[in-house]
Amino acid sequence: MDRRYFLCYSTITATLLLSGCEEHTPQEEQPKQKVASSEKKDIKRTETKPFTQELKIPEEISFSKTKKAKFSSQKSLVQIYTDKPTEVLTFRGMLPNPTIRIKRGENFDLEFTNRLPQPTIIHWHGLIVPSVMDGHPKDVIPANKTKHYHYKVDQSAGTFWYHTHPHARTGKEIYHGLSGFYIIEDDEEKRLNLPSGEFDLPLSIQDRRFDENRKLFYKDKEVPQDNNGVLGDVILVNATPFPYKNVKNRKYRLRILNSSSVRTYNLAFDGIEEFALIATDAGLLEAPLMVKNVIVSVAERIDIVIDFKDKRIGDTVTLKNLGFKEVSNLKLHPKYPDFDAKMDIMQFHISEKAEDTSSLPAKLVHIPRMKASEAVRTRTITMEMIAGGLWTLNRKPYDMYRIDERVKLGTTEIWELKNSVHMGHPFHMHGVRFQVLDRSGKIDFPTDKGWKDTVLVMPFETVRIIVKFTMPGLFLYHCHILEHEDQAMMANFFVER
């Protein structure tokens, strides 16, 4: 990668190079530290010239037009680059995987066959569905077996996603391709006349590593820091490296998903100073919020409206990452851009004039605010690393069959999320949506104002969330840094009738 597109800084205050290893037994002692081998040979990488490939737009599966869909997890050869194919994992033989589009009240019906050699399962991230449909790793599907997913969608419009969720392999499978968008629509949102159709763009952002043969490579066994999170130097948007998109000089809705392994993005635009944040993980905000930049951690989604009306034909606007060094004092793989790296992501090329009939209303939807006084209980979840470099919640490595918390169906609780380490963690809960009550930290996150299913907890910060449990059964909560959840930073909660 041309270095002018990556301005990496070296002022990280902590130079600890922590390792993670599942074989270690937790002990009551301080985590040991490891450093990368100085004799390691570099992987040979070819240059990637940004903004030379057009953004791929995923095909859509609309449940208004089809009653049943089929997925098959499989190895596939796809043209991520134009010169050589790359072996990846897909659901229908191509990347990006299809976008599922469904209306509130419609039935979701999908037949999923696992064509991989190891068991896997699909999780519908952000959807509140019966626990047997949620994609718990205990329910993995053996090789060459099929699972029938069927449920009624009954929640507000929003941008969600799906991905596989086998324990200890989620990171690797998502890294190699197994994820996609899941969009819910409803009549309330439709009446707002937001940009739609070709002006409604899903953008899945992932940093990846490729060798000189365009082959993806994941963890480096000689660099134990990869167990703390895999960083890359090539940004894919919808499985397209540093793409461009020809656009018209009007409003667009961008549905942005951070589907990376560990990287948190601080997103802004060169060429447009402000844009409207209109939605967070689980749906629309009450009103558009004008921002100059927005932070998106792993698994979070934002919907924004950006207006190209003042741009002339031939102008370009660049989506960029400003870097976010505050999220971690831990330096991961020394060969790849760190958390503070400034990175260009993609470009929008203004190529055509167009009449704009869409709207950006001053009011969007009403969000009923939950009050702390409604909570029947407060629970504390502590994020930490224990001896052996093991990432855990409440000092308990994940046990697939252990119930860590029991809650009552229909009750409201406060969960106090305490981060005890130098690294931020995106905390995700299955089977619910929640609201952020408050933070102990100094950074204001505009995404805290909406419905959430994933929230970034900064180093040494405490975040209080309030959640009502509306779906019975067994569900997960975990850090969504993929290497952390694969290791041990995950737990079960059971919603009892």
Image: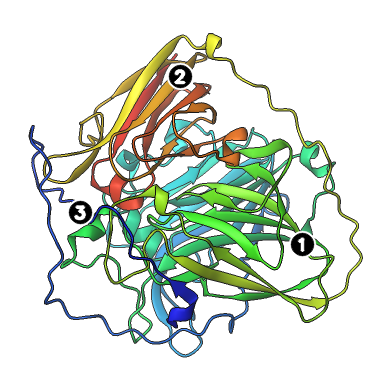
Q: Can residue 341 be seen from the camera position used here? A: yes
Residue 176 horizontal side relative to residue 138, left or right: right
Q: Image quadrant of residue 488?
A: top left
Say which residue label 3 marks.
16
Q: Can residue 450 be seen from the camera position used here? A: no
Name the residue nearer the viewer: 449 or 324: 324
Q: Can you give x and y, in whole percent of width and height, for residue 381 in the image?
A: 33, 27
Q: Can you give x and y, in whole percent of width and height, for residue 116 in the image?
A: 33, 62
Label 2, secondary structure: give it.
strand
Name the residue nearer the viewer: 440 or 87: 440
Query: What label sits on residue 414 in the rendered view?
Result: 2
Seen in the picture, residue 187 relative to 243 is either above or below; the reply is above
Q: Can you give x and y, in whole percent of width and height, for residue 304 in the image?
A: 68, 52
- Residue count near mark 3 (Cα–Cα under 10 Å), binned few <14, some 14–19, many ≥20: some
Q: Earlier in the sequence, mark 2 or mark 1?
A: 1
Callout 2 amino acid: Ile
